[in-house]
Image (cartoon, helix red, strand yellow):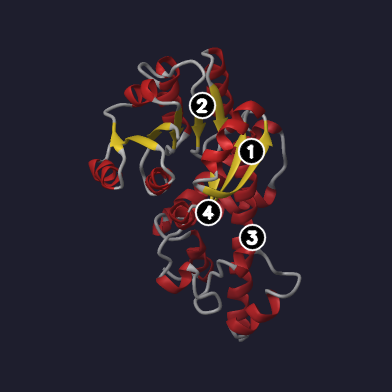
Amino acid sequence: MARIGFIGLGNMGLPMAQNLIKAGHQVEGVDVSQGATDKLKAAGGAVAETAKIAAARADVVITMLPAGQHVRDVYLGAGGIAENANAGTLLIDCSTIDVETARDVAAAADEKGLLMLDAPVSGGVGGATAGTLTFMVGGPERAFVRAESILRQMGKTIVHAGGAGNGQAAKICNNMILGISMIAVCEGFVLAEKLGLDKQKLFDIASKSSGSCWSMVNYCPVPGPVPASPANRDYQAGFTAAMMLKDLALAQDAANAAGATTPMGAGAAALFRLYVGQGGAQKDFSGIVNFIRGAN
C-alpha cells in the first residue's frame, strides 16, 4: 500500500481520500479547514501542516484544488510540491483547471524527476463518495500504469486520454457538451409547459427518441420524471451552477487559444453567467431551467 499525501479535502477531495483509507493506504491530508482534517482523522487518516511536509513523506501526492492558480502555487510556489517531493514521486492533480497550467506544471515536475498526471474527474460528490468517479487522465504512459490501481480505488472508469494536459482537455470538452445539452433539455421542457404538454409525457417520448441524452435521462431538470435528480430536492446541488460556469469558461479560453469555433459553448457560458449572476451560483446547474422559465 502507498503513502499518499492528499492536498485539498473539500467536497470532492475528502470522500476521495476516505476511499483511499478504506483501501488500506496511509493517507496524510492537508487543508485549510480544520473541520475537513478532523473528518479525515476520524476516518483513519493523518494530517500534515503543509503540502511541503506531506510531499516530502509521500510516495504519491494527489491534489484536488479550486483553480489553476492554486495548482501553480501548490506545485511550483516557494515550499511547493515540486521542490520537496522525492525523485520518482507520483503526482496526480485531480483539479479541473486550464490546459496550459496543467502542461506547465507537468513540464516543471518532469524537470525535477517526478511523474505527473492531470486527472480531472466527473461524477460529482455522489460519485466521489461511492467511489464511482470517471477519471480523464493526461500524462506519460509509465505514470498512468503506476497510478491506475490507485485511481480505481476512487473511481469506476479510468481513461488515459494521452499526453500532459489531455485529461483537462477531455474534461472541459465533456462538460461543455453537458452544459449545452442541459440548456437544450430545459428549453424543451419549458416549451412543453407553454404548449400544455405534460412533462412526464414529454419525458416518456423524448427519453426513448432522438432527443434523448444524459441530461434528460439521468438529470431531468423538472421534478417528477427522474426521482433521483436534483429537481426533486429544490435543486440542491450535486454539481453547482458556479462550477458549470467555471468549466464552460475554461472551455471558451481553450477554444480561443486553439482557434476553435464553439458558438453553442459560448452561448451556454453566457446563459450560465447570467444565471449565476442572478443568485443561482450554489444551486444545481440543472436549476437553470428556472432562469429559462423566467422564475426568480
Question: Few, some or many C-alpha atoms within 10 Å of disc 1 (few <14, some 14-19, many ≥20)?
Answer: many
Q: Amino acid at mark 4?
A: Thr
Give the alpha-carbon distance from disc 3 to disc 4, as whole Å: 23 Å
Dot 3 or dot 2: first in sequence order is 2
Q: Which residue is mark 2?
A: 90
Dot 3 or dot 4: first in sequence order is 4
Which of the two discs, 1 and 2, sits closer to the camera? Answer: 2
Q: Along the line of sight, which residue is nearer the eye, 82 or 209?
A: 82
Which of the image's four quarters has the N terminus?
Answer: top left
Dot 1 or dot 2: first in sequence order is 2
Residue 169 pos. (x, y %): 63, 38
Q: Is residue 136 above or below residue 51?
A: below
Residue 107 pos. (x, y %): 58, 19
Which of the two discs, 3 and 4, sits closer to the camera? Answer: 4
Q: Along the line of sight, which residue is nearer the eye, 67 or 227?
A: 227
Residue 40 pos. (x, y %): 30, 44
Give the alpha-carbon distance from disc 1 to disc 4, as whole Å: 21 Å
Q: Which residue is mark 3?
A: 181
Which of the two discs, 1 and 4, sits closer to the camera? Answer: 4
- Residue 62 seen from this side: yes
Dot 2 or dot 4: first in sequence order is 2
Dot 1 or dot 4: first in sequence order is 4
Question: Few, some or many C-alpha atoms within 10 Å of disc 4 (few <14, some 14-19, many ≥20)?
Answer: some
Q: Along the line of sight, which residue is nearer the eye, 156 or 212?
A: 156
Dot 1 or dot 3: first in sequence order is 1
Which of the image's four quarters has the C terminus?
Answer: bottom left
Q: Which residue is mark 1?
A: 169
Give the alpha-carbon distance from disc 1 to disc 2, as whole Å: 21 Å
